[in-house]
Amino acid sequence: MKRYARLTLALCLVVLTLQAQTPTFTPNYDEAKVGNYTLPDPLKMNDGTVVKTAQQWRKRRTELLELFAREVYGRTPTKKAAVSTQTTATEAKAVSGLATRREITLTILGKPLHLLLYTPNQAKGRVPVFLGLNFNGNHAIESDPTLTLAKSWLANTKDGGVVNHRATGKVRGHELARWPLAMILKRGYAVVTLHANDSFPDHKDGLAESFAPLLYRAGQTAPAADDWNALSVWAWSLSQVVDYLERDRAIDAKRIAVIGHSRMGKATLWAAAQDERFALVISNESGEGGAALARRNWGENVWRINTAFPHWFNGNFKKYSDDPNTLPTDQHELLALIAPRPLYVASAVEDQWADPRGEFLSAQAASAVYRLLGREGVAADAAMPDLHKPIMTTVGYHIRGGKHDVTDYDWEQYLKFADQQWRR
Ligand code: GTR
């Protein structure tokens, strides 16, 4: 009997420990339970001074960049590394003859970033370009078997597409639906994409294989609490592509639109906040840590994202897991850092995890900075638009039907928005 009691006690302890290790998360999807929150004012300096001029905004911009770098995404090393560029393959009749496709490798500190660039064959002169990170490797953009298979780490899949963390031929075309190349090329835009995992493999121990250790400070062996992590490294990789595009004679580097979906949307917003060479910015369902307000308790929250993806944000951001109200920033201020450049935020109604309303409210709150800089944003008293009723001021927004994804409907709006902004 005594032995039985001891065994039961031991079993209970095991169960309790396991429970403590795997806490459950119940997202809130009830407006009544969102709670009250006060957003920090992007137009108030840290010392309380109200920002009234474009000149003062430049100072405030620097303050906000510092806060996001220190407390949220981590600092990006400023050191410029030497880059060697190599075109490894060219296909003059890609996408049914619509484009010339180039595979270009940028080697930075001995590590490669593989770009896949499509330029429309019909175009005369330099063309504007859509740039975006992909999730699965460049071979996932088309099903063409001649396209080089990505070599970077990928999460294994049950269908044999990724084995031992490396892509097999089966994953070709996996992201094809999200990159409607023909539609974009026919409108006269180039497309350039790169695999996020080339710069930071997307898993909790990915840092070691990322660019981060290559850019450590002298004597550094581990990241500091304010150092960069996956989202910042991905953002940095986008800026490396801009450095390249500025040297490519087929591209109009003054018209680079950067687009990102979901986690890549988060990285995209942070890239564009820091690097003003991105002329137009698109956040497709970037959600928590992207466009959605952190203080609004809906769907994914800071605690959940830090727990599931400890490698995305910096060490300091973990301090805010229990209470996002203690953050010195909120995500509308990240969007505001893009002002006065055109910004488009998009949501999907079945993507409640990303908080569509929180994404809209964030774009609306950021619009105060657009107005200060003489641009039209989402009006302060505007109601959230209905499904498929895009708003297109310098700040664009839509919510569409369907799930978390990038669809042709989304692209139709982005192309229209870019045409409108660039008067094409
Ligand atoms: C989810 C994550 C989101 C979003 C998404 C994605 O698991 O919770 O923040 O980034 O992944 O990237 O598709």
Image (spheres, rainbow, N blue to C red):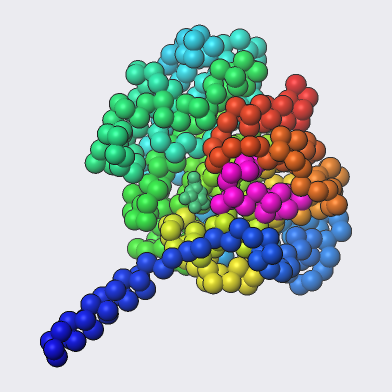
Give the residue displayed 27% in from the left and 80% down from the top. 13
Q: Is residue 391 left or right of residue 79?
A: right
The rendered magenta stretch, by its main secondary structure, is classed as helix
Asked whether 350 or 1 is in front, the reply is: 1
Asked whether 171 or 424 is in front, the reply is: 171
Give the residue displayed 65% in from the left and 66% down from the top. 33
Relative height, residue 349 to residue 320 (above, below) = above
Write the start and end of the magenta stretch as one range. 346-364
Give the residue displayed 35% in from the left and 71% down from the top. 19
* Residue 68 inside the magenta-drawn segment: no
Q: Quadrant of residue 157?
A: top left
Relative height, residue 294 to residue 16 (above, below) = above
Name, please, the residue furthest toward the front. 1
Name the quadrant of the C terminus. Answer: top right
Regarding residue 261, the answer to whether it shows in the image is: no
Residue 9 image position (x, y, % from top left):
23, 84
Asked whether 303 or 237 is in front, the reply is: 303
* Residue 347 inside the magenta-drawn segment: yes
Give the residue displayed 44% in from the left and 57% down from the top. 309
Residue 415 image position (x, y, % from top left):
67, 26
Name the quadrant of the N terminus. Answer: bottom left
Residue 402 image position (x, y, % from top left):
59, 37
Q: Is residue 305 left or right of residue 385?
A: left
Residue 403 image position (x, y, % from top left):
56, 40
Q: Is residue 21 left or right of residue 280?
A: left
